[in-house]
Amino acid sequence: MRRKSKAYELWKQMKPAALRRLALAVFLVFSVLGPLMILMESKLEPVRWNFVLVQTIGCGGMAASIILFGRKRWWITFLIVCFWSAVLVFNGGGLSLQFDEHESFRVRLNGPGNVKPLTVISQPVTLSPEELDALYVQRGSIGILAIALLASGYISFVRVMRSEVKERARFETEINIAKDIQQSLLPNSPVSTSWYSAAGTAIAATEVAGDFFDIIELSEDRFAVAIADVAGHGIGAGILSAMTKSALRSQLRHDASPVSVLKNLNATVYEISEEKMFVTFAYVLVDRTTRSMSLATAGHPPILFKQADTTTLEQLRTIGLGLGIQSQSRYIALQRTFQAGDSLLLFTDGIVEAMNTKDEQFGNERLHNMFAASHGSPVEVCSRITSELEAFIGSKVFQDDVSLVCVKFT
């Protein structure tokens, strides 16, 4: 079953040019059924070559058409089968319902000649040497045609599959390289210092994720934490994700303030991204000397802030469009103070929008309640949330990228 699934996925993902080559190979292989059906006919009589040609094209055409158009709606495949079946039936003279002299009922595809009732041959059939030679020559020619079609189809099929396998191998190699590069861009997590600890996790829905997070130590007294979610997922989203993170690191060397970071990142993403791609972003700059946080968000879910002496959560969020939507977007910063024992949770919407088998979302309320009741380290908080999410959806494979970062002040 696993091999069938892989073969089916290979066919579903083929490019149009490769699909046409595969259809030609399948046409040649299955067109062999036309000559074979004629050779298996028990009646020894000459057949018209146009009859042989239509039977050959009909058998191959049915298989090739299914390969070309079978990826569309099921009723299209049904119509294809009906059409080619009708071609084969009418070319054979139609279907006849016959009884022999023993009252046995048969459904018969009539030959290219006249329809005759089935009878038991009581007299031997006499053929002249010339007629017998002509019959043998024709049947031999039909056999050679069948062998030639089968050999040509096999060679074509092998070439198509060999080319496709090489293309897939190259593609998978590039995917693995992109995946390794993206994994190398993730920060070393967890981070633990004398005044804070942080940890994060990123789970890709496909081989390459569109989410990323970063924990950047700017000095002994300052650090920044960021999380982003590129619209969509896959290779394109992964490339934009890596470029956005590189731009973030570059920007932090000049000005780490939230407004400046979001403003310059927005201009960069707007220039490098395609028209319908954008990035939601959340950023926090923490300063130990003033015991304060400065944060800003760009179309991203709120940052959850939990104080040590309460289980009530505060949702920290500022107004601002996602990065790359407009060239000149306006961003503002929000200020908050923190104390030892306070904690932050940054996450992407892949968590709250995750669906279970009942089409129920994990939801903000469930996430908020889990974080409000958490008392462990950032590593334990992230681990518990991801475990609960996997149990909720009943799988470790997510429909969207999932990322979260937890920070706890000590």
Image (tube, grey):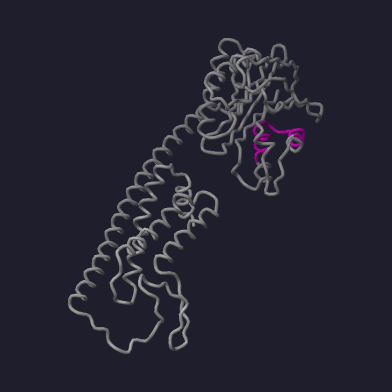
Which residue appears at 52% of the width and 53% of the height?
76
Q: Position of residue 187 (x, y in %)?
A: 56, 26
Q: Position of residue 279 (x, y in %)?
A: 60, 25
Q: Which residues are magenta?
A: 368-386
Residue 379: say if magenta.
yes
Q: Main secondary structure of the magenta part?
A: helix
Which residue appears at 64% of the width and 33% of the height?
379
**Residue 358, placed above or below residue 365:** below
Q: Residue furthest left?
A: 129
**Residue 97, placed above or below residue 376:** below
Rendered image quadrant of residue 16: top left
Residue 77: say if magenta.
no
Left or right for 207, reference 92:
right
Q: Position of residue 347 (x, y in %)?
A: 66, 30
**Residue 117, placed above or below residue 405:** below
**Residue 283, placed above or below residue 150:** above
**Viewer-closest of 159 and 383:** 159
Image quarter (top left, top right, bottom left or bottom right) of the C terminus: top right
Q: Residue furthest top?
A: 254
Q: Position of residue 395 (x, y in %)?
A: 62, 46
Which residue appears at 61% of the width and 41% of the height?
398
Which residue appears at 55% of the width and 33% of the height?
209
